[in-house]
Image (cartoon, rainbow, N blue to C red):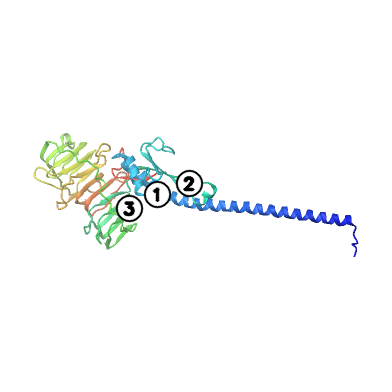
Amino acid sequence: MMSKFPAAHRKAVRRDTDNALTVAASASGQVMVLICVALVALLGMIAVVADFSFMQDQRSMMQTAADSAAMASAQELNYGDAVAAGKADAATNGFTNGQSGVTVAINNPPSMGPNTSNTAYVEAIVTMPEPTYFLRLLGVSSISVSARGVAYEGNGPNCVYVLDPTATSAMSVTGNVTIQSGCGVLVDSSASNGLAVTGNVTITAPTIGVVGNYTSSGNVSFTPTPKTAVIAASDPLAYLTEPTVGSCAHSSFSLSGNTGSSGSPYQLYAGTYCGGISVSGNSWLNFNAGTYVLAGGGMTITGNSVMTGTGVTFYNTTGTGGYGAIALNGNSTVNFSAPTSGSLAGILFFQDRSIPSTAAGSTITGNSSSTFNGAIYFATTAVTYNGNSAVNGYSILVSDKVVINGNSTVGNNYSSLTNGSPIKGTILAE
């Protein structure tokens, strides 16, 4: 049967059909190309996300190492090799300088940031090339990752340290007592009653920590609640060099109910007091600035004495007559402040560390008008502390054991000290 359409028409139809098929094939090819490109881009994005997630995990570990290294360096800044300390610390965190492409740079002052001209700050930069996995498909085999930390040594967070590692009632607070501390309290004893509190007692401090545990009996209030199972602290003043015991400037010095000329206080001067210092009665005396070495006999103050001393340190050791404790008793008014600069800055009482723990403990007592601005440091013996410190001043108590049975205010205003608190703590700044 013959077609009703002429040949020319049939040719035109076939031509249009072929063109349509060609266009369709071309469009299909373009779609496939776009799909392939999209798949490559998607795979690339997955590769980037996967690898960078791994890099971020690695960088978090590096940041920990950098921060720790900076703090370790700052701690050694004034006492040892800050660079070696920082690199050694980074190594303990898995980043050893020179190994596996790791670079640990310790800079004092920092090489960048807001503290570039401040030599009190130390910078640690940890850098390491990290291998990639998915990005290798795109020709990237490794990426350099780095972390930076900056630290300085500031005032330590604690100012009451009780160092005996096992004693029961290592810190004992008894009676009608209110303790207001502007800085932390730390008890090293692992005993179940390392901190023992009895009576009508209120203790307020930023932190209260006990290695072991604590007990309380009576109307006792803690702010905050003591934290138990904390990590023990070493002696925070162990770095101090003990004063030299010189020749005797005085032997068994004693004063009873005396004043100086024209109704002024009796004047004492720094030096070595062999046999110690004994004051009784209604005495009025002033200790001039300097270091008072008590070579045996200690120091005993009784009666209604009034004593002042600015820029003074009392170093208690053995000597004439054997060891004697510090005993500030009675209704004495005592206003003592430690030196503000020098090797003994901030140190008010300093006992020879070779004195055994079995030796008699010392007593630091003052009436409500008394001030003790400085560290009371008896690392190996007990102290009974009933003193007060001016609210605008500071007090530090470091002892083997301590008994507190009177109201005490422990300030932490170190502005009078050239280099701040003698107890230091490393602080991250950046």
Mark 2, residues whose alpha carbon is within 10 Å: few (<14), some, or many (≥20)? Answer: some
Q: Which circle, 3 or 1, is nearer the viewer? A: 1
Tell me the kind of residue under disc 2. Answer: Ser
Mark identifier at residue 115: none
The quadrant of the picture occupied by the C terminus is top left
Q: Position of residue 205 (x, y in %)?
A: 32, 53
User: On the image, which quarter does residue 12 sit in?
Assistant: bottom right
Mark 3, residues whose alpha carbon is within 10 Å: few (<14), some, or many (≥20)? Answer: some
Q: Which circle, 1 or 2, is nearer the viewer? A: 2
Q: As rendered, which of 147 and 15 lies closer to the eye?
A: 15
The quadrant of the picture occupied by the N terminus is bottom right
Mark identifier at residue 142: 2
Q: Position of residue 8 (x, y in %)?
A: 88, 54
| Residue 332 visible in this rendered orientation of the protein | yes
Q: Looking at the image, which residue is at 51% across and 49% down?
A: 136
Q: Is residue 220 left or right of residue 103?
A: left
Q: Is residue 138 left or right of residue 193?
A: right
Q: Which of marks 2 and 1 precedes in the sequence?
A: 1
Q: Which circle, 2 or 3, is nearer the viewer? A: 2
Asked which secondary structure carries label 2, the reply is strand
Pointer 2 with pointer 3, Cβ within 8 A: no
| Residue 387 visible in this rendered orientation of the protein | no
Residue bearing the label numbered 1: 64
